[in-house]
Amino acid sequence: MHVQDERLRTGADVSATLQLAADLARRALRDEALLQLAHCEDWPEPFNEQGLLVRAGVLARRSPVLGLESLAAHSETFTSTEGRFGYLTLSAFAYVNSRNFDGARDMLTSAQELVGDDLTRAARLGYERSRLQWATRRYDPNSDDIALAMSDPDPFAQFRALALRSWMHAGLENYAAQSHDLLAAFKFFQESQASCDITTVAINLHGMLRLAVEMGDNDAMRAGEAAYEAIEWTPDIQDLQFMCVRALAWHAFHEGDSGRAQWLFKDSKELAPTLAWSVMAHLDRAYVARMNRNEAWAAEELALANDLASEVEWDATHGEERQALVMLAELFSSTDMAQAQRYVSIYSALGKDSLDPTLVSAHDRRSIAYEKYAAGRVQAVLGNLKIAKESLEFAYEVFAQIQYPYRAALAAAALFEVTEDLQWLEKGRAQAAHVEKSPLFRRLSELDKVEEQRVLSGLTPMQRQIAIALSQGADLDELSHQFSRSRFTLEKQIEVIFAALGVESRHALRAELRQRKML
């Protein structure tokens, strides 16, 4: 006999079981919650409705399709007004997550008929309608529905309404307002942790930490670090913990503590929830190593990332892990052009249409700017300077407009390399001054003499990279693979390089590059 059958037979308190299951679901202990809810459809009314809603909510967190299937299988059970309203709004939630926006609209239209004079239902419906608006890219932080959602007196309802409004601001690229709302939301979490759904909290914590890193917002970072420590992390939200640890690591890097950053990135590798995210974990470490001029470590991590990336079914990804392709292209652009081009092509072919609409990357220009930056780096080394300049300028303008100083500084530095225009160097320094403890600021501050020598050498970006690879022992076949050029073309390029630098051998080339601080 099942535990639930025994409870019913003996008249045990089903209400206590329901409360326990709801608390386990809230804490992201989903297997434990589902165990408590086994056969909840057989509970007496109204507990059967409430139990089915909790169970469908747990399943919808794992897969919107599973949640919808569970709701559909028991649709006739929801006979009370409250139960039917919960069925319709939860179905709308799952439909949004499965990209069936028409289905979500139909459910919310039906739910409207059940609101009546109930202010709590009106607030809940306002939230779900606003969520649908955001998912379909209709951003209005001042809408009547947002105001309704904000009117709910429940602390967690206040948290999620503020968080949703923050993402409306993000859709309008008003990231200062987004940060303000997220900070306000986390005050509710700090005061009412016991009532908050931890999955929702963790999703928004990642958003706040990532925004704090990019904008250099120390207030938001402190609030985020406190929230991270307060959360009881479980395997069901390991993906969100992974992304939060990554954000904390990048903050350490921007603060000039590369050692702590690498330790946190090492922790993130252990948490990586998928193969694609494991690729990103290696790339994070490769990037930090390269920025600190540890090429041996960078090459090792990049090789590990490349090996893992070959096993990933990128077509099956629908989230932010796709950014690993952009980072692969960026890191390979200086050493292996064939790989860099391939990863840019894969990312571009995937497009944005298949992205999960509940993710940030589906909603604004930031993901396009990341792609343009990586593509610009690739095109610069290929010698397509006009295309490179256009791509990098797009990236710079986006990052500068949305006040992402580190990203803007990277784009400006790349533009300086492409154009040799000192104005871009100055723009890069001005942006990097917002993260003055970072290795990037230090590197841009040291560019005067080094870049003067590079400019005087008369080498194009591709020729510089060929010279470096040649001095490090690469033969013509390896150079042909790395730079997607024929042996004949490379031989001509090497002649130009030797003449520009006044050398006649690889040994002399290596010595000259070291003297010019290009190695």
Image: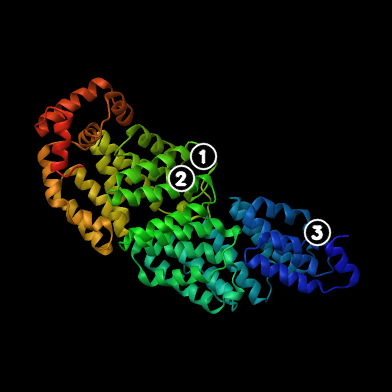
Name the quadrant containing residue 51: bottom right
As measured in the structure, the alpha-carbon distance from the residue carrying label 2 to the one carrying label 3 is: 46 Å
Q: Tell me if residue 74 can be seen.
A: yes
| Residue at image coords 26%, 37% | 381
Which residue has dot 3 on it? 76
The mark closer to the camera, 1 or 3, is 1
Q: Which of 425 and 35 is in front in this view?
A: 35
Against 384, residue 120 (above or below) is below
Which residue has dot 1 on it? 312
As measured in the structure, the alpha-carbon distance from the residue carrying label 1 to the one carrying label 3 is: 42 Å
The mark closer to the camera, 2 or 3, is 2
Among numbered discs 2 and 3, the one appearing first in the sequence: 3
| Residue 503 in the image, given as x and y percentages of width and height | 11, 30
| Residue at image coords 80%, 63% | 40
Query: In the rendered structure, are the residues bearing label 2 and label 1 in contact, judged by CB atoms less than 8 Å apart?
Result: yes
Residue flagged by tag 2: what amino acid is it?
Answer: Val
Residue flagged by tag 1: what amino acid is it?
Answer: Val
Q: Which mark is residue 279?
A: 2
Against 280, residue 349 (above or below) is above
Among numbered discs 1 and 3, the one appearing first in the sequence: 3
**Please, what secondary structure does the residue beneath circle 2 have?**
helix
Residue flagged by tag 3: what amino acid is it?
Answer: Glu
Q: Which of 5 and 229 is in front in this view?
A: 229
